[in-house]
Amino acid sequence: MKSNSLVFRSHKLGISFRFQKRVPTVLFILIFTTLAAMVIATSFGEYRTPPLVVIQTVLGIDTGNPDYAFVINTLRLPRILTACFVGMALAISGTIMQGITRNPLADPGIIGIDAGAGLAAVSLIVLFPNAPAGLLPLSAFGGALIASILIYLLAWDRGTHPIRLILIGVGIAAVTSAFTSLIVTFGNIYDVSQALVWLAGSVYGRTWEQVFSLLPWLIIFIPLALVKAPQLNALALGDEIAKGLGSKIEWQRSFLLLISAALSGAAVATAGTIGFIGLISPHIARQLVGGNHQGLIPVAGMIGAMIVVIADFLGRVLFAPVELPCGIITAVIGAPYFIYLLVKSRRK
């Protein structure tokens, strides 16, 4: 019989990947679609730039008009790249979270990790308005990490259980959201307005500084997520089976939780709370390539990138010249999808 899987092994690195044959094809289509969406989004604005000019400018080809280089490279490209990277981080974080909890409705935004990152970031914006911008990603990561540790510790009872993780996470999300509202209520009006715009989830006004602040987190933690994909596959089968396969369950679960918190915290610090990406992307990816996390993680990441890029573009064009934060667009799409998943799960 012909195998439906492709296997990649590196004896020097000590890693092995097995994924469905359709994964490279699906990834190619998603990358092409995302790049096309990025080119179209970059070309649109008050100062129109033809898509071909966008491609030439990004590749460093002289177009004969210096205005194009300024508009594309300085004003628009950082925003589009930020949307792409943030969507990728949130989607992979959600994929890991669903694998850890073995619950397709789990998402960093639903179980409290994003809320922890949001509380830390809002605290920095409102209470310490003169703090350097570079502290925001670290602050959000710290908030996400503290929320993750609290969820893990409170869910511990001679081990952790996926259901307890979710229930405790929902409680942590409620508490941190209450504290965020308290800070917003009593903060300085100017700082609070900045925090509220940030909480809506937007990549408006993002510069190369934000791109380069987010990039190291992706470079470190996305490869770690891919390396840990076999352990995530084992955990998804259940604790008893994972133990039988020789997996150190609590160590693997806590380390994967750290990776999820790092990606989610960095994304929230960069663009605010853009909801439902970590919920929707893994579901779509499973429909395309199945449940093997070695193929699921990169496919879900590209789907998340594509969704946020398109959501940001729609937010710019639907009510132009007024811009809607991309977080509002993803919420409009994600909330009905979440309800659909709840109804679907009840029927099973």
Image (spheres, helix red, strand yellow):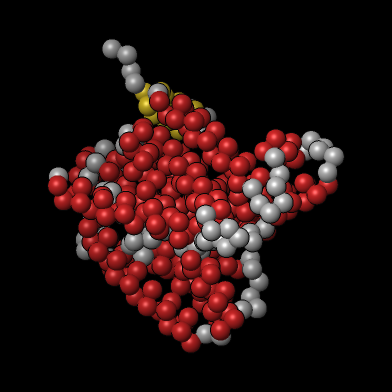
Can I make out residue 338 in this image? Answer: yes
Question: In the depicted view, which residue is nearer to us: 166 or 228?
Answer: 166
Question: In the depicted view, which residue is nearer to us: 233 or 196?
Answer: 196
Residue 62 to residue 134: above or below: above
Question: Residue drawn at (24%, 41%), measured in percent from left and top?
Answer: 237
Can I make out residue 251 in this image? Answer: no
Residue 283 to residue 163: above or below: above
For this orientation, the residue located farthest to the top is 1
Question: In the depicted view, which residue is nearer to us: 67 or 238?
Answer: 67
Question: Residue drawn at (59%, 81%), measured in percent from left and top?
Answer: 190
Question: Residue drawn at (31%, 54%), measured in percent from left and top?
Answer: 336
Question: In the depicted view, which residue is nearer to us: 102 or 300?
Answer: 300
Quadrant of the rendering where the N terminus is positioned: top left
Residue 297 to residue 166: above or below: above
Locate residue 21, reporting x and y percent: 40, 23
- Quadrant for residue 110, please give it: bottom left
Quadrant of the rendering where the C terminus is positioned: top left
Locate residue 60, reporting x and y percent: 77, 38
Locate residue 257, reporting x and y percent: 38, 55
